[in-house]
Amino acid sequence: MPLDTTAQGAAQIEMSHVFKRFDNGTLALQDMDLTIRQGEFVSLLGPSGCGKSTALRMISGLLSPSSGQITVNGHAPGSAGKSAGVQGGDVSFVFQEPTLMPWATVFDNVYLPLKLRGLSRREAEAQVTEALEMVGLAKFGGSYPRELSGGMKMRVSIARAMVTKPKLLLMDEPFAALDEMTRFKLNNDVLNLWRRNGLTVIFVTHSVFESVYLSSRVVVMAPRPGRVVHDLALPDATTRDAHYRTTPEYAETCRLVSDALEGTMDDVDLNH
Ligand SMILES: Nc1ncnc2c1ncn2[C@@H]1O[C@H](COP(=O)(O)OP(=O)(O)OP(=O)(O)O)[C@@H](O)[C@H]1O
C-alpha cells in the first residue's frame, strides 16, 4: 500500500534521524524518520520494548532525543505551555492510567489545565462543560472519580486532554486496561473527536485490530533496537463505524498489518 500524503495538510511533526539511548545503555530508538501531517490519525504499533512510548514522549517534549531533530509545528517539542504539565498548549497527552485527582470532582479534574493557565472557574465553565459533553459526561461534573467506572474515568481523562482544544492529541495505550466492549465504545468516541475537531492523533497500541479500526496510517515498529519497519496508509478512516469491524476490507487490512507486525517478532525473546 503506497503512502499517499498529497491529500493531507501541512507537516505537523517531523522526526529526522532520531536516536534515543538511555543512561543504562539501552538503544530505545534508532534512526527514526517520521513525518506526520495535520489531520492524520497515526498508530504506532509494535511489540513491547520497540520504543513506541519513547517516541511519543519525545514528540511531547517529556524526553529529549540523544541525537537527531524533532519539530512540532516548526518548534522544539513541548516549547509551548510546558508549565501546564500533561497539557502542553497545542498538544495534549492521554496516558494508560486516567491519572485523575481522587479528591476533586469530575468538573475540577477537567478544569485543571485551564486553572493552570490562570482561568477562574467561572471563566472556564463553558469550556469544561463542552469538553464533558464531548465525551458524554455532561451529567457527571459533580461526581468523584471513585464513583465512576474505568471507562468513564478514561473519558474524563480524554475530556481533560480536549479542554484546551489541542491540535495534536498523543495517546499512550489509553484503553489497554479496559474491557473489550468499553474499548470499542471509546474507540468510536476518539474517532468522532478526531473527525469533528480536525485533530491530529498519534496513538500507541499493541493491538492490530485497534490500530486498523482507528487509523489513517499505521507505523509498525520493531525492537532491539527500536525502529520503524513499515509505514502503511489505510483506506479512508473518516467514514468508519462499528459496522466496519465486520467487513471483509477490515479483515483483509488486519491481515496485512498483522503480517507486517509478525515480521518484527522474528528475533524477539519473550523474556523481555
Ligand atoms: N527510562 C528508561 N531507562 C532505561 N531504559 C528505558 C527507559 N524507558 C524505556 N526504556 C527501554 O527502552 C526500550 C523502549 O521502551 P518503550 O517503553 O519506549 O517501549 P514500548 O514499545 O512503548 O513498550 P511497551 O509496549 O511495553 O510499553 C525498552 O527496552 C525499555 O526497557
Image: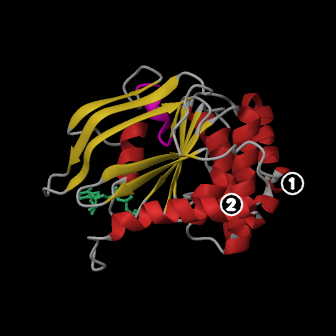
**Would you place residue 53 above or below residue 88 in this image?**
below
User: Which colour assignment does the render follow?
Assistant: secondary structure
> Sequence order check: which comes first, mark 1 or mark 2?
1
Mark 1–mark 2 Cα distance, whole angstroms, equals 35 Å
Q: Where ligand 1 lies, by quadrant?
A: bottom left
Q: Nearer the viewer, residue 122 or 62?
A: 62
Residue 149 location (% of width, % of height): 72, 70
Q: Nearer the viewer, mark 1 or mark 2?
A: 2
Task: Tell me, yes or no, whether the highlighted magenta stretch contains residue 201.
Answer: no
Find numbered disc 2 in the image and state the secondary structure of the residue it sits on: helix
Instruction: Report the magenta residues as a range.
Output: 79-86
Q: Is mark 2 within 8 Å of ligand 1?
A: no
Residue 204 location (% of width, % of height): 49, 54
Task: Determine whether, in the image, residue 38 is placed left or right of residue 196.
Answer: left
Q: Farthest residue toward the bottom?
A: 271
- Looking at the picture, which amino acid does disc 1 mark? Lys
Residue 14 falls in image quadrant: top left
Count of numbered labels shown in the rendering = 2
- The residue labelled by disc 1 is 139
Residue 237 falls in image quadrant: top right
Q: Nearer the viewer, residue 135 or 2?
A: 2
**Would you place residue 229 above or below residue 92 in this image?**
below
Residue 41, visible in the rendered structure: yes
- The residue labelled by disc 2 is 250
Task: Determine whether, in the image, residue 233 is placed left or right of residue 72.
Answer: right
**Would you place residue 75 above or below residue 44 in this image?**
above
Find numbered disc 1 in the image and state the secondary structure of the residue it sits on: helix
Q: What mark, if any, has residue 236 been given in the picture?
A: none
